[in-house]
């Protein structure tokens, strides 16, 4: 049986030479452990999903995503509800999902650990037929994701930081009506995030108590009180006290409806999408198998 490695050659701002080195390393590590390696480079958006689906049809025993959150999302979406497990080599701007799973940030170690790991099941989230493994967002983070996406090509962490800094000044909050099993609430929010895991990325913990395998999602809403207060409390994302931010609430949900008076831009694992004025969110318990040490 084979191990398929799907590599995004530009993730993390990689050069063509570095992408080739990634492919050579992946093949060597898999071969060294007695499996047959199949290594593919993505060429366009959506290609990772196609490659992962093809790997399932060929009977691969493991599919490894080497790239950022976008590549991970495509591969995970293809492996959802299948028996073939996912592994990952983190190479993106944030790597929140990898950090949450405890994946080694050293590529050789991450691949080695994945090959020998016993797969376990985790949940997936869904926003209007778009699956996500880590987080989905409808407010500030969706705006940043859309602006980051417009850059195209080699982007990297520095570009993400620059866009976020500008957005902290220019972003205009919107009015949302959110319906859950607990009831219906209206708010003017700067942030509306649905988290499957605790981390945005870069150790920013948007939902400190979220678990990947509890059959629930964490709905995080930060209402806009004053922009300067929001900015001053950003460090709380990094010390696990986001719940103490002014206007912050966190609810555990299985499903929710999010409405706004204008069509909403949202993101799934950092990949932006355009939705309507009403979006459905739900969890799929134990929908994905992951191979991590």
Image: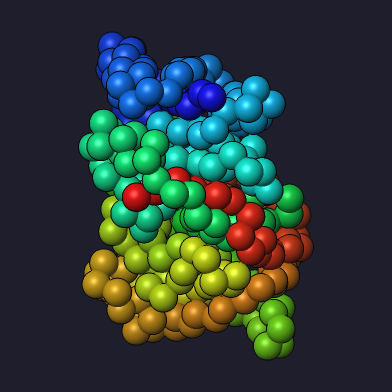
Say if 108 sits above or below 126 in the image: above
Which residue: 61% across, 60% down? 286
Residue 234: x and y in percent read 30, 68
Q: Is residue 293 visible?
A: yes
Which residue occupies the foreground of this view, 141 or 74?
74
Quadrant of the frame with the N terminus: top right
In the picture, measured across the screen, residue 147 lies left or right of residue 127, that is left
Residue 281: x and y in percent read 68, 64
Which residue: 30% across, 79% down? 241
Residue 128: x and y in percent read 73, 54
Which residue occupies the foreground of this view, 102 or 252?
102
* Number of numbered tags placed on the structure image: 0
Farthest residue to the front: give it: 34
Farthest residue to the bottom: give it: 182
Which residue occupies the foreground of this view, 20 or 111?
111
In the picture, measured across the screen, residue 69 lies left or right of residue 78, that is left
Which residue: 39% across, 36% down? 115
Q: Is residue 149 visible?
A: no
């Amino acid at each position: 049986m084979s191990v398929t490695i799907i590599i995004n050659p530009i993730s993390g701002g990689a050069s063509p030479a570095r992408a080739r080195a990634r492919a050579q390393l992946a093949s060597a590590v898999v071969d060294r452990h007695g499996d047959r390696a199949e290594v593919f480079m993505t060429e366009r958006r959506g290609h990772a999903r196609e490659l992962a689906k093809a790997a399932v049809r060929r009977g691969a025993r493991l599919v490894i995503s080497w790239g950022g959150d976008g590549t991970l999302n495509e591969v995970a979406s293809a492996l959802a509800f299948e028996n073939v497990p996912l592994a990952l080599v983190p190479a993106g701007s944030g790597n929140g999902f990898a950090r949450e799973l405890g994946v080694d940030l050293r590529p050789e170690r991450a691949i080695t650990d994945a090959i020998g790991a016993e797969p376990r099941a985790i949940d997936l989230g869904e926003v209007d037929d778009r699956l996500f493994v880590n987080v989905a967002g409808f407010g500030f983070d969706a705006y940043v994701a859309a602006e980051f996406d417009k850059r195209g090509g080699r982007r990297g962490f520095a570009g993400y930081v620059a866009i976020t800094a500008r957005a902290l000044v220019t972003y205009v909050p919107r009015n949302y009506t959110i319906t859950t099993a607990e009831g219906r609430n209206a708010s003017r929010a700067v942030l509306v995030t649905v988290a499957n895991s605790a981390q945005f990325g870069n150790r920013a913990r948007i939902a400190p108590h979220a678990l990947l395998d509890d059959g629930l999602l964490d709905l995080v809403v930060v209402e806009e009180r004053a922009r300067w207060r929001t900015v001053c409390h950003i460090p709380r994302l990094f010390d696990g006290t986001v719940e103490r931010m002014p206007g912050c609430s966190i609810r555990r949900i299985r499903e929710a409806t999010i409405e706004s008076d204008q069509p909403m831009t949202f993101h799934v694992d950092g990949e932006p999408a355009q939705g309507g004025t009403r979006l459905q969110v739900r969890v799929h318990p134990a929908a994905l198998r992951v191979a991590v040490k």
